[in-house]
Image (cartoon, rainbow, N blue to C red):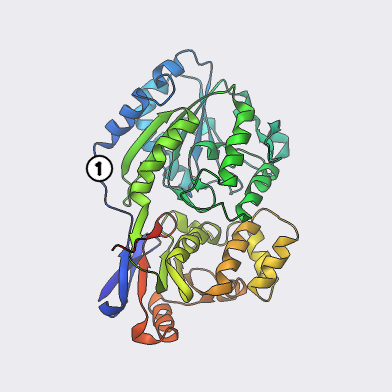
Amino acid sequence: MIIAVPYGKENVEVEIDKARVSGIIEANNVPIADESETVRKAIENPVNSKKLSEFLADARDVLFIVNDATRATPTARVLEILYEMIKSLNVKFIVATGAHRAPTEEECYQIFGRYYEEFKSRIYFHDARADKDMVYIGKSRNGTEMFVNRIGVEAHKIVIIGSVEPHYHAGYTGGRKAFLPGIASYKSIEQNHSLALRPEAESLKLKGNPVHEDMIDALGTIKDKEIFAIMTVLDREHRLYAATAGNIEDSLTAATGKAKEVFAVAIKEKVDIVVAVARFPMDIDLYQSQKALENGKMALKKGGVIILVSKCRSGIGDDTFTRLLSSCDTPAEALEKISKGYVLGYHKAAKMAEIGLWADIYGVTGLPDELISSVFITPFHSLQEAIDSATAKMKGKDAKVLFFMDGGMTVPLLDESL
């Protein structure tokens, strides 16, 4: 059979014996209503909050915190609905890059759509390394020191436009992530993300997740700030499935159930080979694409092969994790180094090294072979070649292959009743 696999904004085709295919996994099909009406209903019926129109009525100024281009958040679609409400207000926007780079001009159009030109002079890009722009606002019980962008501290009121999907160590994206890591200092992000090394930091989990709970605790340092959150949930075609709004914590909680309906996918068995695809826009770099490996491993048998498929359009991303991995001869050595001291990015290295202890990682990317090889990934120049090599390694026709078409966001859950 011929299977079309996403690569960048196009597809690549592979041929495989149908008997070997355990499944072609995508996010679940969900019913899509009128997308604009979905958002309007959310902002008119907020969770534990006044309506947005009432929230904005006495605003001296309003700061919108929006996601960067690594997320498919429908920021422009939400702004279209809000435009009449905000066009005459004193509004600013900050792109919550966390520790990522600032978006390019093309990515700004991706984020803001037709509103980019109008609001261009009022859009700011967070730079986590710009200490001069940060203000200290308190400390979490775990010791995370909250330094955040002064633009957020000085704003009278804040509106967050975010999206909620599974996240491999924070449980879910959305809500509190607008602040930490969104507009937090590099130091604050590093302290929080060190908790990602704990086993309780996992996808689909909030209660007991140390990364999430530290974020919530740290958010308490700005409890007096007036915030209205708009959380969206997309389907597998990036259409708007659901929206919640209001209180930053409660709107996130309300959205997680909808996100799980889309992105938690039942599988009947673990397999020998997983093809883990990082789809656009998460294929922006290797740093983001690692999430596809982390989710894909949940469907992989010990001793199997996981094949990362990602164009890595902008290269590596933050190279801290690749420098750590490439300095070691084995995954075990990398984990030993990480245990001696955490640096932001080492959680990525640790997650990749942990997979490398019990499985083989192949890569079909746009990155140089020598770079991929240095981080314990075997490079291939075509997906067909990678699959053929993996099936040969795993005893040919007996090997079962699972195609995981949106590995960065979709989480496989074993359902033995299938």
Residue 189 is drawn in which quadrant? Answer: top right
Q: Residue at x 31, y 78 (%)?
A: 20
Q: Secondary structure at mark 1?
A: loop
Q: Residue 242 at x, y = what percent?
A: 33, 38
For residue 139, which quarter of the picture?
Answer: top right
For residue 151, say whether it is visible.
no
Q: Nearer the viewer, residue 293 or 112?
A: 293
- For disc 1, the marked residue is 32
The structure residue drawn at horizontal position 68% and vertical position 42%, both measured from the top left corner, is 188
**What residue do we see at 41% from left, 42% from top?**
256
Amino acid type, callout 1? Ile
Furthest toward the right, the residue is 340
In the displayed structure image, the side of residue 19 where residue 188 appears, left or right = right
Which image quadrant is residue 254 in? Answer: top left
Mark 1 closeness class: few <14, some 14–19, many ≥20 residues within 10 Å:
few
Q: Position of residue 184 (x, y in %)?
A: 63, 39
Q: Quadrant of the N terminus?
A: bottom left
